Image: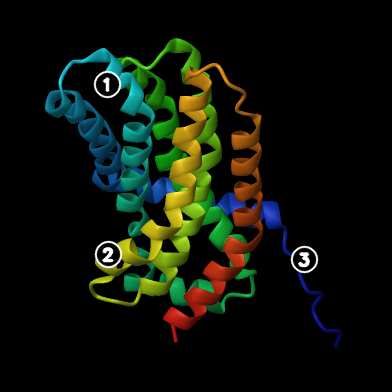
Amino acid sequence: MTEPESQEINPIGVMFAIVQRELTLAVRHRGELINPLLFFVIVITLFPLGIGPELNTLQRIAPGIIWVAALLATLLSLDSVFRSDYEDGSLEQMVLSPMPLTLIVMGKLFAHWLLTGLPLLLMAPLLGMMLALPLESLPTLVATLALGTPILTLIGAIGVALTVGLKRGSALLSLLVLPLYIPLLIFAASAVDTMAAGLPITGHLFLMAALLVFSMTFAPFAISAALRISTH
């Protein structure tokens, strides 16, 4: 008898199946999907009430407010990336499956960005206008969020993978991830401020793009290794 031919793994097909699964689960649990977005909107709308309606003050701090709110909203949604799979045993099956774990991880993270990062990106211009951010600064804000929100997901998922097996991993996740977010937060908010001042922002965007490429290259492997440690 001849041995059955091994089926080749289609990376695109694997990632598409994982993304489709995550989107289907998100539709079934709409509360977990909406909560980070509501948090993002509420945090930004509360700042003018606490600081006052002074336009110059709002314009100066608007980039930092939006980016801090996006960071915290992303962090709030990250804990659910692997938690439910860990609790029902699906994560262990993913680790043991013949499919490369890095492909599964990339599919789950891309789905998370579609559900969290992309809505934040779309809502940011409207909220920026509410904070009196100049119209010419809005494209820069969107560009920084387009480059930065995937980095937030990739870096944060490393912390999630390390703490997924802990009962109170959320508090530890914040301690692990927030220091790593600080450089990105500084460069992103600085890019919008620099644009508002009429100075070139090419260096800021190139640096953020380099951080994105670095994160996309190494984070999936780090997350896969952390998941194997957490499930054993």
> Is residue 181 shown above or below 34?
below
Label 2 close to label 3 by CB (< 8 Å):
no
User: Which three-letter amino acid code belongs to the residue tagged 3?
Assistant: Glu
> Tag 2, which secondary structure?
helix
Question: In what quadrant of the picture does the N terminus appear?
Answer: bottom right
Q: Nearer the viewer, residue 31 or 1?
A: 31
User: Which three-letter amino acid code belongs to the residue tagged 2?
Assistant: Ser
Residue 18 visible? The answer is: no
Residue that mark 2 sits on:
170
Q: Which of marks 1 and 3 is in front?
A: 1
Q: Which of 88 and 217 is in front in this view?
A: 217
Q: Nearer the viewer, mark 2 or mark 3?
A: 2
Report the Cα–Cα distance between label 1 and label 3.
58 Å
Give coordinates of residue 144: x percent, y percent.
Answer: 52, 33
Residue that mark 3 sits on:
8
Label 1 close to label 3 by CB (< 8 Å):
no
Label 2 close to label 1 by CB (< 8 Å):
no
Give coordinates of residue 42: x percent, y percent.
Answer: 20, 32
Give coordinates of residue 152: x percent, y percent.
Answer: 46, 49
Q: In which quarter of the image is residue 220?
A: bottom right
Residue that mark 1 sits on:
57
